[in-house]
Image (cartoon, rainbow, N blue to C red):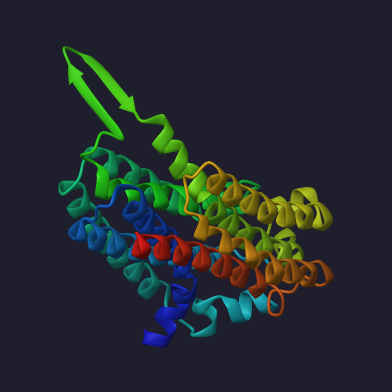
Amino acid sequence: MTLKAFLKLVEIQTKVASVIPFALGTVYTFYRFDTFNIKAFFLMLISMVVFDMTATAINNYYDYRNAYETKGYGYLMHNAIVKYNLKESTVRITIFVLLAIAIFFGILLFLNTTILVLLLGVLCFVVGILYSFGPIPISRTPFGEIFSGLFMGFIIVFISVYIHIYDQGVISWLYDAGILSVHVNILEALFIFLLSVPTVNGIANIMLANNICDREEDIANKRYTLAVFVGIQKSLKIFEMLYYIAYIDILFLIVIKALPLVAGLALLTIIPIRKNILMFYEKQSKAETFPLAVKNFILLSVVYVITIGIAVILS
């Protein structure tokens, strides 16, 4: 397998969807807790990115194996196995090697933090694999946007914060005489969740935009996505509202002083994002307008991360 084919198989350009939430959690940790664990940072980064590559390769492999419709943009151009005439055995070996690397670094991360990281990591791995694998893959159901948004947009943010503050009592537990006591700082946990709403919604919208563009192909391939269930117009309304909820969330966090005032600059991205929303309303095309959802996510999230980073530097 050539490097070009491998990068296409794992869709390396989409890894930004996991790296940005990771960066968001990291800068928030600096801002809120003024701490940083460099070893945990790199262990999580490697495990997370490699597993994201694994999940994408699995998704492409099972899209190839389960395709009913073998014509059109999605099958001929989007799937690396077809485009580069890859052997199934080569793809399977690649998937297992990537998974082994991700598990190895994930275990090292657990050994340097707490068992909660292990439990959340296992949960992420299971959901990531079941997203494309199994009798009813999540990606072929109306719940793909929910799972991708929550696990990539929130759980990654949460873990990327927690690995730096696992010893500061945000979440702690005690097992004694058969009794397990768990203590959670609800306020801090809630702040982390609200912090992640823009990435949750942005990632969900990438998946939703993809499914809107692929609706006819998905029907032919028996993928019963949200766009298939509710139709194009309702899907577009959901697509639009998720962005507005993200902006309301940022404004709320600034008002209650959970985020710095400078984070308000992220609200200005509504101007180009609103323009992109209208363009997507006019035409839903995988090749032409789907990238607008990716651009929206990158634009809002990167500005969001940078503004919090500015507050860290100024403080």
As drawn, 103 above or below 116:
below
Q: Extreme top residue here?
A: 177
Asked whether the viewer can see residue 132, the reply is yes
Residue 247, image quadrant: bottom right
How many marks are shown on the rendered structure? 0
Residue 230: x %, y % from top left:
78, 48
Front position in the image: 158 or 52: 158
Q: Who's the residue at 62% across and 52% down the image?
A: 246
Q: Classify residue 62 as left or right of residue 159.
A: right
As drawn, 85 above or below 60:
below
Front position in the image: 239 or 265: 265
Q: Who's the residue at 25% across and 19% down the image?
A: 180
Front position in the image: 222 or 300: 300
As drawn, 79 above or below 208:
below
Residue 212: x %, y % from top left:
73, 62
Q: Extreme front residue here?
A: 314
